[in-house]
Amino acid sequence: MNLDMIRDRWRDIRAALEQDIMDGVLEPGARLPTEAELVKLYDAGRHSIRRAVAELAKEGHLSVEQGRGTFVQPRPMLEYTIGPRTRMRRNMTSQGVDVSGEMLGVDRLEASPRVARRLGLAPGAEVIATRRLSLADGVPVSFGTIYHDAARFPAFPERRQTLGSVSAVYASYGIKDYLRGSTRMYARPARLDEARQLRQHPDMPVIVVRAVDTELDGTPLSYSEVIWSAARVKFNISTSEDEA
């Protein structure tokens, strides 16, 4: 085997592992053999094995979990429609995806200038910041914080836990319908803590979405800052209310 073949050996290993994933030989959630086992299996050096695994992790095929091992990553490439009536549960369940969420924490704090401005509040007004992780078929797709006026929605987190959806919580406050007032988004490299939260490779990017939801008359209801996995979700911007 010449030097070029040795240098490119990782490509063959990567292709073989990817094929096993696509063919279902390695099923979603399955633990990859250890590095030593892969070295023996492919008769290759550790560098080639590490490079192949790293590349597959960057592409979202594998999830490297420190202290546990490397696992085949379920890859729900979901289409999330942002429109006049953006609803996460409707977006996901329409694609046959089971949506679930985890409460990461709740804080009552003074609104930052940006949060106060987005919610139409006086600087320093008290807001409730609810942090949540969202999962699709058990795979993390996003996490972030949603801010509400504490004076208007004093029990928002508790009602969300009980009622299960934002729409149901708003309805409990007498708000039967609401709109997406504005959406700003941009992509950037993931920070280490974000990659860990999303269980994705640190070299995979994230999409930051900042949004304001409003009542039908334009009165702000919430301001959110959410980090999405760019490898698992693609966004569709729609002007049709039927598609949002």
Image (tube, rainbow, N blue to C red):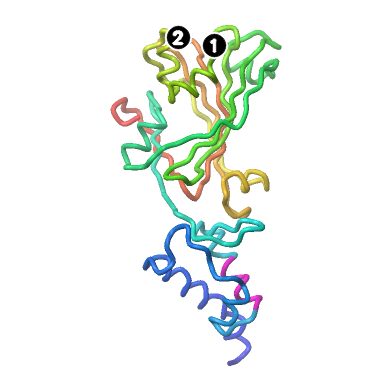
The residue that label 1 is drawn on is: 153
Residue 31 can be seen in this image: yes
Task: Give 210 or 127, whichever is nearer the viewer.
Answer: 127
* Residue 180 image position (x, y, % from top left): 44, 22
Name the main secondary structure of what is drawn in magenta.
helix
- Three-letter amino acid code of the residue under disc 2: Tyr
Vertical comparison of 212 with 77: above or below: above
Question: What residue sits 43% from the left and 24% below the top?
Answer: 165
Q: Dot 1: what SS?
A: loop
Asked if the stretch drawn in magenta spans residue 51, the answer is yes
* Residue contact at pointers 1 and 2, CB within 8 angstroms: yes
* Residue 123 image position (x, y, % from top left): 69, 11
- Three-letter amino acid code of the residue under disc 1: Phe
Q: Is residue 241 left or right of residue 112?
A: left
Residue 173 is labelled as 2
Vertical comparison of 161 with 190: above or below: above
Q: Dot 2: what SS?
A: loop
Asked if the stretch drawn in magenta spans residue 162, the answer is no
Figure quadrant of residue 130: top right
Nearest to N terminus: mark 1 or mark 2: 1
Q: Is residue 175 left or right of residue 142?
A: left
For the N terminus, the image quarter is bottom right
Task: Give 34 or 90, whichever is nearer the viewer.
Answer: 34
Task: Specify the segment rendered in magenta.
Answer: 46-53
